[in-house]
Image: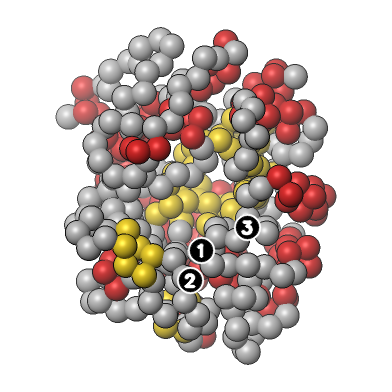
Amino acid sequence: MMNEIFAPVRIGRLDLPNRLAMAPMTRSRATADGGLVSELTAEYYAQRATAALIVSEGTQPSVRAQGYIQTPGIHTAAQIDAWRKVTDRVHAADGRIFLQLLHSGRVGHPYLYPDGGLPEAPSALVSGESLFTLDRGMLPHPVPRELTADDIGEIVRDFAAGARNAIEAGFDGVELHGANGYLIHQFLSGNSNHRTDAYGGPVENRVRFAVESVRAVSEAIGADRTALRISPGNEANGVAETDTAELYAALLAALAPYPLAYLHTLEAHPGLRGVTEQVRRGWAGPLMLNSAHHGGGDPVADAAELVAAGTADLVALGARWLANPDLLDRARAGGPYNEADEATYYGGDHRGYTDYPSLTPLAPAPASAAG
């Protein structure tokens, strides 16, 4: 059954050599001033280029889209240039990489923004979560500013601009983050969206922002270089759906006209497998699954079972790729696997980032790329 994860698959314009993708993971190692990724980031992703597809950490398409400290952007020329060093390294190692575009919505804080303004959201409803800072501890999220219809249109245009910038930076495509309680998810869920206009109320209205964002990005760079991440039933960052089956049926129906590279669904806990199977039945294109639970088992073996069962075409793993830059080789060998050090997940230097050992020592960075 393990052979299933080594079979090729096509998504959009890409022929992928296997079925083990690298899930997007926030690492908070961009510069605090400017949101720039570094040569260390290029090394980190290049080490993992044997993944079927790398999906980058969440990257903000505008200043107000940021939700965490030291996360990268894709809205300035300097950010585009910095990311190009990453994509060049990944492609030189025969890898493929999508940029994840993330607008955090109410999961933000004035601390992050030069003007000290409020984060923005579908409705003026607080997340109940807090922002971690290095100098002021945990700062509770404030009540966000409710977006106007004009504001919504501007954010959709920001997504399209971010997608064009990503292609300019050398990415193979873009994944819109519509999961985990961030802005698109905030529009989808009735408990975070109390609007009474065309973007609120019935599910057909609440999916509108997601669909408009997908359409704008598809028109900017091509539907076959566009993807969307969702997390049906996931109660993250204060979002709690009450109509998951109806909501995602409406979303998938509205997305049907767009032949996306893939749909990426996060299964937050075992009880959501039925929802995952509903998504599988309702989505005609390639499906990537990120199952956040493994019951103490082997995530790679679980991935093979999911592909063999037809539950997903690709499986995205997070911590396994983080701790094992040569995960594909280890999977072929049946292990052993390094365990991820949670203490080094966010921020810091090379430790817990580029220093995880491989079964065979990794080749040094090319002099031209390191210089």
- Distance from disc 2 to disc 3, alpha carbons, whole Å, reads 14 Å
Q: Residues within 10 Å of mark 3 (few under 14, many from 20)?
A: many
| Nearest to N terminus: mark 2 or mark 3 | 2
* Residue on which the image places disc 2: 127
Q: Is residue 61 visible?
A: yes
Q: Residue at x 28, y 66 (%)?
A: 112
| Vertical arrangement, residue 181 with respect to residue 28, above or below | below
Q: Is residue 290 left or right of residue 274?
A: left
Q: Which SS class for mark 2? A: loop
Image disc number at residue 237? 1
- Distance from disc 2 to disc 1, alpha carbons, whole Å, reads 6 Å
Residue 349, given in percent of the width and then of the height, sits at 24, 36
Name the kind of residue labelled 1 in the image: Asn
| Vertical arrangement, residue 219 with respect to residue 98, above or below | below
* Residue on which the image places disc 3: 234
Q: Which SS class for mark 3? A: loop
Residue 59, given in percent of the width and then of the height, sits at 40, 54
Q: Residues within 10 Å of mark 1 (few under 14, many from 20)?
A: some
Q: Residue at x 58, y 18 (%)?
A: 331
Q: Is residue 302 left or right of residue 62?
A: right
Residue 366, given in percent of the width and then of the height, sits at 26, 21
Which residue is nearer to you in this view: 136 or 162? 136
